[in-house]
Image: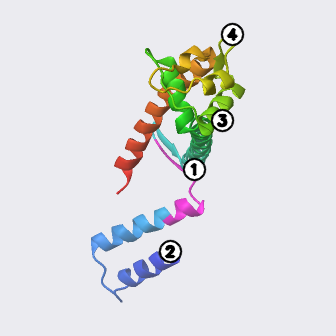
Amino acid sequence: MVVTFLSLFILHVIGQIKIDTPAILLLILISIAGLIFSGFIKGIKWKDFEFNFGELKGRQDELEKQQHELKRQQELQNKLIDLTKFLLFGLVGVHERNHLKKLNSEGRFGYKPRDTFADELRRLLSLNFIGRHTDKGIRSMMADSDPNRNDLKTHFFITDRGKEYLGYYEKFGEFFSALQSIETEEQP
């Protein structure tokens, strides 16, 4: 670039070609930029003003490292969110979660004693989300077959761990709903 500039400038001076002032200024600026980016000019110093192009490059590298670290942290957070979703929504099925909610609510919990219902209660028992009342359990619950009068709460109760799960489910459910609405707004 410097050679091109000097060649054009010499041709202008000896009258071979005519170059106007803005073109000369543009060539000068391009030449200076070329010298800066090639590393021939390390900085500018004039009176009290000093600017070091090497520091600018160092700051740019530092910003790129920070952006890379931020991106890595965001990826880790997304993985943690996915894992939390999996655990909260996959650990306990919809029907099991509804049983927990009903056991945690006021009033009677009427039910129809079916094998799948008993299996869901066994799963909640194995997770320690519900407990048995004294001398009660799956067999007594299955024997209590009138859905108009029976009450699951006479056989089982929700444990503190089950209440804790419901609390987390509710909190994170709100978080995931808000996150999903933000992602929907960002999509074109």
Report how far apart the C-alphas of labels 1 and 4 lie in the structure.
74 Å
| Three-letter amino acid code at the position of disc 4 | Thr
Q: Which mark lies nearer to you, 4 or 2?
A: 4
Residue pointed to by mark 1: 57
Task: Say how the picture is coloured.
Answer: rainbow
Q: Which mark lies nearer to you, 1 or 4?
A: 4
Picture quarter containing residue 116? top right
Number of the label disc, if any, that sits on residue 119:
3
Report how far apart the C-alphas of labels 2 and 1 lie in the structure.
22 Å
Comes first in the chain, label 3 or label 4: 3
Report how far apart the C-alphas of labels 2 and 3 lie in the structure.
80 Å
Residue 185 image offset from top left, x and y in percent: 34, 47
- Given contact means CB atoms under 8 Å apart, are the residues at marks 2 and 3 in contact? no
Report how far apart the C-alphas of labels 1 and 3 lie in the structure.
65 Å
Residue interval drawn in magenta: 34-46
Residue for point 50% across, 74% down: 1
| Three-letter amino acid code at the position of disc 3 | Asp
Residue 3 image offset from top left, x and y in percent: 52, 77
Residue pointed to by mark 2: 1
Residue pointed to by mark 4: 134
